Amino acid sequence: MEYPYEIEMKVRDYECDIQGIVNNSVYQNYLEHARHEYLRSNEVSFAEMHNRGVDAVVARIEMAFKTPLRPGDDFVVKINVQKEGVKYVFHQVIYRKADMKLSLKARVDAVVTVNGKLVSAVPEFDKLVMNS
């Protein structure tokens, strides 16, 4: 799969558990931060959309943990967006930069509501699918 967007990040000590690896819940933060930066890079503003009554929300997340990240690891999060019915599917992977080993593979299904009602498409997100 091609990933048209990527962002580099670094593991902080406090994100790790007693085993010395990134706690599984922290990976969701990495994924969310990457999605928000991806949207920002495509001039999509959650605040502006919300002010118009348009809200994108996560409906489901699937994560497969492969190689753990450890304190100080540099890593890259890559994103591809596809459309499946009413869902915008964010395919995301995390690679440890030192050896480019796959750390995590995720699928994040998002849906969009307008004034609280589910809609099948919004131009801001349709643009992301065309760019992927």
Image: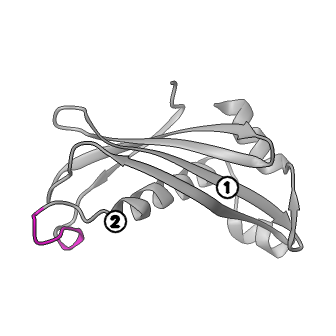
Q: How many marks?
A: 2
The boundaries of the magenta stretch are 14-20
Q: From the viewer's perspective, is residue 38 above or below residue 30? A: above
Which is nearer the eye, 107 or 124?
107
x 10%, y 63%: residue: 20
Tell me, what colour scheme is on the image? one colour
Mark 1 packing: few (<14 Cα in 10 Å), some, or many (20+)? some
Above or below, 95 relative to 44: above
Q: Secondary structure at mark 1?
A: strand
The disc labelled 1 sits on which kind of residue?
A: Ala
First in sequence, mark 1 or 2: give its number: 2
The Cα–Cα distance between marks 1 and 2, rounded to whole angstroms, is 19 Å
Does the CB distance between marks 1 and 2 fall below 8 Å? Answer: no
Out of 28 and 7, give the one closest to the viewer.
28
Residue at label 1?
110
Residue at image x 86%, y 62%? 118
Residue 84, given in percent of the width and then of the height, sits at 74, 39
Which dot marks residue 26?
A: 2
x, y percent for residue 16: 19, 67
Q: Amino acid at mark 2?
A: Val
- What label sits on residue 87 in the rendered view? none
**How crowded is the residue under tag 2: few (<14 C-alpha within 10 Å), some, or many (20+)?**
few
Magenta residues, dominant SS class = loop
**In which quadrant of the rendered image does the C terminus lie?**
top right
- What x and y, as percent, mark residue 36? 56, 58
Q: Position of residue 63 (x, y in %)?
A: 42, 50
Whether 55 is among the magenta residues is no
| Residue at point 27%, 42% (across, down) | 66
Q: Residue at x 68, y 64 (%)?
A: 57
Quadrant assignment, res 71: bottom left
